[in-house]
Image (spheres, coloured by chain):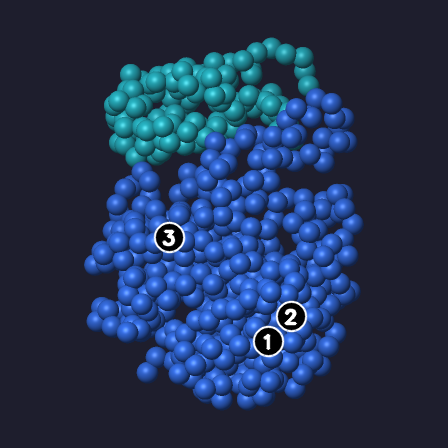
Chain colours: A blue, B cyan
Amino acid sequence: MKRRVVITGIGVIAPNGADTETFWRACLSGTTSVASIPDHWREYAEFASTLWAPLPSVDFPRFRISRIELMQQDRTALMAAAAAEQALAMAGLVLQLRDEKKNTYTLPSFDAARCGAAMGTGVGGIVSFSRNQDNHIQTPLIPFVNQEGRRLLRHPPRFHPFAVPMTMPNSAAASLGIRYGLTGPNTTFCNACAAGLVAIGHAYAAVARGSLDLALCGGTEFLDEGYGGIFRAFDIARTLVRDCADPAAANRPFDKRRSGFLFAQGGCAVLLIEEREAALRCGRVPLAEIKAYAESFDAYSVMALEPGGAAASRMILEACRDASVAPHEIDYINAHATGTIQNDDVESSIIEKIFGNRPLVNATKSLTGHAIAASGAIEAAVAALSIRDQTTHACKNLDDPVRPLNFVREPAAFPIRNALTHSFAFGGHNAALIMSNVS
Amino acid sequence: MARARREGGTRHIFPKELDMTISSIEERVVKTVADILKVAPDRVVSAARLREDLGADSLDMVSLMMDLEREFEGSISDEAAAKVATVGDIVALISSLAAQKTAVSPAS
């Protein structure tokens, strides 16, 4: 017997907003974050793409994150904690301080063993690893390097005593569990660009089947190791936006003149999800109800979508069936829409075949760039906010669409009863989530 | 005295601080210890043992050394950190490292 699951809080850190409402307002006003990549990166390599979406600075103390935590955790875990704080605050949950020294809390009125955390990340604490590796390799090298060479070597002064927990991909989820005393299952998913949505989907399934009553779930990613090396990896694979002549117009998912995705410095979104009846009894106002989650796997290529979209289509139809929502009842689709030639072509074809041009379609990555695992969760957040506010953001830079779908051209009041969000990842992992208006 | 710059890889122990008198070091150590261990500052006396009296566990000791490095903008070696047992030991350690740095040396 499936229980009903609602979203009661959302936290977001994205290139165009360091908290949920700032982010959402930015989306609705078409505000993006685009900049030239840092000059010093070009001292290390030549790049075909020269644009990225940097993150804003995050006021971590505002989210009760201590100085010590800032020194001892990877950015992915810190962002997850900040986003979780936002989500809990939005839900109106009052936390009780458990240990002042460790900066941990409890959720009163919840059985901790029935509360869990699930996070998705593409590469976890890769930046912490990279910075420590810099120190490791460069320290014995320095005496042999001249002044000019030393300028190019940039490492932290100390090999971090917490290098291991900072690097491990499970650190964000673990940090949430520790912070709030959640002793239910604590899991991390690494399905690349789908990981954030996969984490939300699995957390939803756990609450629906009765294993958990509450979960903090989402995705987190931080991709700036200081030299542009991670950027280079995506660049050399020819995935990044190439036509950078006009930075403001370069990132254009679904447009015929698209040329790749805009690399985001990182990002994070955390959703607070709960069993519906308990949330309502406690007077919490759900933003949206999650109706179904489905996954599939292309079994085709590590870096390309299967052109026929068979597995992705099957997954979307399965999600609709599980949600008891027919395709013609989906009012809004938040697409994966990275802006690569291939993705947007295949994806728009899938959408057209299943839904025709009835539902609204938009591409959050046209505003945020691609934050890998964080994007799936950020886009789930957008779907929920769209349902809450019965409006959604436009597709930025969409002048000449690849297919005649019902793309959002400007925000307006839209009747959104049911929304679909899906992600397709390197490796061939597909994930889809359907959520509905709370009635 | 010119403040020494941190360059990639060059290990300066502490920059030349204008105000590294014992009393100012002590004040800043007390503040840091009280903040990290979440104890009242009036318990952070010279003879107080970090572990037995102020409740520091091994993770707290790591955090403390890292925060002291941040506070005094320098590096504390693992060997030096291992010898620290009391608040007074911390003050002595930082004072001696600061003194080494302010010793007469060729003008830079």
Tell me the SS state at disc 1.
Answer: helix
Residue closer to the observer: A179 or A190: A190
Residue A325: quarter of image: bottom left
3 and 2 marks on the same chain: yes
Res. A99 in view? yes
Residue closer to the observer: A142 or B71: A142
In this rendering, the label closer to the viewer, 1 or 3: 1
How far apart are labels 3 and 2 at the CA level? Answer: 32 Å
Classify mark 2: residues with Cα within 10 Å, few (<14), some (14-19) or many (20+): some
Residue under circle 1? A310
**Which residue shows up at 27% across the image and 58% down it?**
A114
Q: Earlier in the sequence, mark 1 or mark 3?
A: 3
Q: Residue A62: x percent and y percent? A: 40, 52
How far apart are labels 2 and 1 at the CA level? Answer: 8 Å
**Which residue shows up at 56% across the image and 73% down it?**
A312
Q: Earlier in the sequence, mark 3 or mark 2?
A: 3
Which chain is indicated by disc 1? Answer: A
* A65 relative to A72, above or below: below
Residue under circle 3? A186
Residue under circle 2? A306
Tell me the SS state at disc 2.
Answer: loop
Res. A82 in view? no
**At label 3, which amino acid type do we have?**
Asn
User: Mark 1 and 3 residues: CB-CB less than 8 Å, in contact?
Assistant: no
**At label 1, which amino acid type do we have?**
Ala
- Name the disc covering residue A214, or none: none
* A371 relative to B19, above or below: below
* A262 relative to A258, above or below: above
